[in-house]
Amino acid sequence: MFAPMNYAALQQKNEQLETEVLTLRAELKELKRLIFGSKRGRFIGSTGQGQLSLLADEVPAASTTS
């Protein structure tokens, strides 16, 4: 069924798996922080009526009423 492994090979495999588990736990922690973390630092922009958008293709002409 399984190929027999010696003790040293099993120890090496165990260390590899432990390293992988630690890496995956750190990655999971970072992803949870990004998804469920504080929203205070997030920028939510809104352009008001008097504010122009930086991504606008055309600049509206200024009214010249005197």
Image (tube, grey):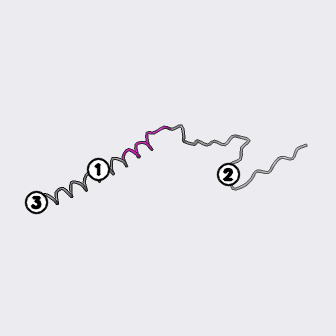
Which residue is label 1 attached to? 21
Res. 2 mark: 3
Magenta span dominant secondary structure: helix
Q: Secondary structure at mark 1?
A: helix
9 relative to 50 in the view: left or right = left
Query: Looking at the picture, how far across and down is residue 25, in whole percent?
Result: 33, 47
Look at label 1 and name its amino acid. Answer: Val
User: Which residues are drawn in magenta?
Assistant: 28-38
Res. 54 mark: 2
**Cα–Cα span, label 1 and label 3:** 23 Å
**10 relative to 65, above or below:** below
51 relative to 14 in the view: left or right = right
Q: Which residue is more in the foreground, 65 or 10?
A: 10
Query: Looking at the picture, how far across and down is residue 42, in whole percent?
Result: 54, 42
55 relative to 24 in the view: left or right = right
Look at label 2 and name its amino acid. Answer: Leu
